[in-house]
Amino acid sequence: MEGPPLHSKSIVAVWGKVRILWVKADKLLPIHSGGNIRSYNIARGLAAQHAFTFLSYYDGKRDEGYEKEFKRHFSDSVCLCTEKRNTSVPARVLDYMVRFSSEAPYAVSRFASPQVRERLRGWFQDRCFDVVVCDFLDAAVNFPGKITIPTVLFQHNVESEIWRRHALVQSQPAKKLLYQVEFAKMLHYERKIVRRFQHVIAVSEHDRRLMSRWVEPSRITVVPTGVDLRQFKVKSGGKETENLVIFVGAMDWGPNIDAVQYFCEEIWPAVQAKLPGARFRIVGRNPDRRVQKLAG
């Protein structure tokens, strides 16, 4: 069921401070990934101007340290520990098999939580908020079937495109079949959720064009990722480094691994042919073994 367009400007004009609920699966802190950096800074900006409540839910054991620190960043926050513990490989395989018949792909269904679903159902029923932000696709699995409050889907990627890529490049037959199944489920689910929510935030014009195949383009707004230049100032008198190319990103994430491999194999040789002294530096956490092989 498609929701009506969301006109945030009219909401602000009527109520002044908007009552916003932000819902995110998994921990937000520490802020060490691109998605978390993006979520944190936008959420902090909204919290400074509106009545802002942040619901953060996570698996594993109760983490009182995380909840205390989270409260420091977002004073009106709700942290829920689902206590699910599927950390070992056998446990994850079993969990996947249990959820295989689910309409949602495993990357989404594994975040389902009766506890979170019940909390959201109550808030929607009582209309406690003016706008609800669903931070990424995985949190959508716990939203009620009947959306009674204007709701925004905050997309960090078009997730089905990532799974399409996995299915396309995988060479091992068993993994390729698995990726094909998950890609088909992800495409169906993502298209359904994008249509269901009243408005969608995209990270780029490219993602907006992709999702415009599923829903009226006017219901998608691009909010590009930026950099706070006040945090990064050039030191006066610093030594300039010529012909240095730097790639910065999480180096345990598939698209980034593909990107640096492609760059080193297809583009960098041509650069070095014209600039023999040029250097390429990869900066990022948890480098995959394929990235480590590029060293030197």
Image (cartoon, helix red, strand yellow):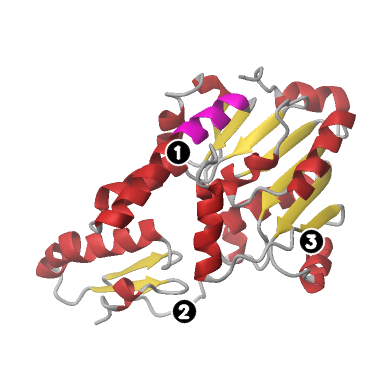
**Residue 75, quarter of picture:** bottom right
**Measured along the vertical axis of the image, is residue 53 above or below residue 227?**
above
Q: Considering the image in quadrants, where does the C terminus appear? A: bottom left
* Percent of width and height locating residue 21: 78, 41
- Label 3: which residue? 73
Q: Left or right: 67 with respect to 85?
A: right
Which badge, 1 or 2, comes first in the chain's sequence?
1
Crowd around label 3: few <14 · some 14–19 · many ≥20 (10 Å):
few
Residue 233 seen from this side:
no
Secondary element at tag 1? helix
Marks 1 and 2 sit apart, C-alpha to C-alpha, by 55 Å
Q: Which mark is residue 237?
A: 2
The span picked out in magenta is 188-196
Q: Is residue 97 magenta?
A: no
Secondary element at tag 2? loop
Residue 191 or residue 215, whichever sits in front: 191
**Measured along the vertical axis of the image, is residue 21 above or below residue 277?**
above
* Percent of width and height locating residue 135: 64, 45
Give the amino acid type for the residue marked by disc 1 in the picture.
Lys
Residue 187 or residue 76, whichever sits in front: 187
- Label 1: which residue? 185
Q: Judge depth for marks 3 and 1 and give the one in front.
A: 1
